Each structure stands twice: as structure tokens, then as C-alpha cells.
Image: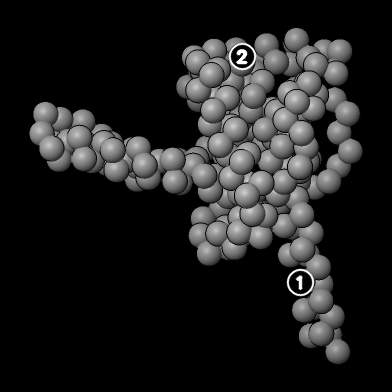
Amino acid sequence: MTALHEALQFPFRDKYWIRRLLIGGFLLPIPLINILPIGYLMRHFKAYLSGYSIDRLPEWDDVPLILSLGFWACLVLLGYLVIPALIIALGIFVWGGFWGVFLIIIGIILNLYFLSFLPMGLAMFLLDDRLHSAFQKRRLAASISSIGTNYYYCVLYFFLLIVLAGSSPFVLFYLEIVFCQIFGDVIRPVFKQENQVNSGVQRNNDR
């Protein structure tokens, strides 16, 4: 796994890092327009998952690709958050009693639980290029289990740093770039193993 301090330093090795981070941080809080920075992050994440050698931040180019990746990634995120959000909204609607508090707590717990699967779900979507791959819970759980504690450490670090980032979209965008590298390096071996297994099965079927 890439050391956290190395990943935190990586964006600054690009001589144009200020421009690239400012663009992402400026666009991130704007509804609908934020599909662009999300797509930018997904392209960066996919490059790590694919095992490419990356020595700098990607350009803000190939807008159609960025838009496409951002749109589908937003659908994945919506799929993960819709149920907890509805439960929390229901709890707020009946606020003032035991059931209101109970529903809000359950919604928050479910939200954190679903979000722990999100990095793997996005990885499955990006490498399979199929939306439903992001929601195959059995496959997601098996893949996370094969990684072990490193995956959960990454999730924990991400949550903690996001809390420390506060409300700054520029810091948030920077941290998301950092964790594209960390999660990419942690998750990539899972797909290598899957490809090896699938290749072995294919060879056996061809005999």
C-alpha cells in the first residue's frame, strides 16, 4: 500500500498542481457542474487501478470522457446514498420523538456502512465498465475480504481526513486525488487475481 505521506506529497510534484487543484476545487461545490471534477477523479482512479505509471496529475482535457465518467460515478454514489438519505429524511420529518432520533441514527450508521463499500464499488464499475458491477454486494464483500485490513484502514483514514478538511472544497478535492492513488494501489491486486482466475477458467474451457 502506498504510504499516506507519499500520497499526500504526490500532487505537489506536478509543476501545474495549483491550476489543476484550483479548477477542481472551484467546480466541486457547484451542482451539476461538479460532474466534471468527479469525472476527473474517476479517470485518475482508473489509471491507478489499471496499473499505469503515473508521475503527475492528469490534464483537464478529454471533456467528453470526464463527463461520462462523472455522470455514471454520480449514479453509483446516488445508489449508495439514497436509502440512508431517505431514512434520515424520514427521521427529520418525525423529529421530536424517539422514532425520529432512532431513524436518524440508523440512517447515519447505514450511510457509513454503505460508504465503506463505495471505493470498491467505483473500482468495479470503472474496470468492468458496467454500472451494475458497482452493486454486486457478494463480489464486493469477497474482494474487500481478500484485501483485509488495509482496505478498512484506507476508509478510516479517508473519513478522518475529510472531517479535518472541514468545508473547503479545495482541500476536499486535493484529498480525493490523494485517495485515488491510495485506494488504486490497495484495490488493484484484486483485479489481477480475478483476471488470473478468469484466464485459467478460459484455458480449461478451451481444452
Residue 166 left/right relative to 98: right
Instruction: Residue 51: give x, y in percent of width and height.
Output: 83, 46
The residue to which callout 2 is attached is 170
In which image quadrant can residue 62 be found? top right
Label 1: which secondary element: helix
| 69 or 7: nearer the viewer | 7
**As drawn, which residue projects farthest toward the bottom?**
207
Instruction: Tell me the residue at 55%/59% (across/down).
Output: 141
How crowded pointer 2 is (Cα within 10 Å; few <14, some 14-19, many 20+) is rated as some
| Residue 79, horizontal then vertical, whole percent | 45, 46
Crowding at mark 1 (Cα within 10 Å: few <14, some 14-19, many 20+): few
In percent of width and height, residue 156 lies at 56, 36
Q: Would you name the residue on which mark 1 appears?
A: 198
Separation of disc 1 and disc 2 at Cα?
41 Å
84 to the left or right of 27: left
Image quadrant assignment for residue 189 = bottom right
Q: Which secondary structure, mark 2?
A: helix
Q: Amino acid at mark 2?
A: Phe
Which image quadrant: the C terminus? bottom right
Q: Is residue 30 left or right of residue 49?
A: left
Tell me which numbered mark, 1 or 2, is placed earlier along the sequence.
Answer: 2
Q: Residue at x 86, y 33 (%)?
A: 54
| Residue 66 visible to an observer of this rendering | no
Which residue is at 76% across, 42% downward?
1
Q: Identify which residue, 119 or 106, lies in the foreground.
A: 106
Q: Is residue 204 above or below residue 86?
A: below
Residue kind at label 1, given as amino acid type: Asn
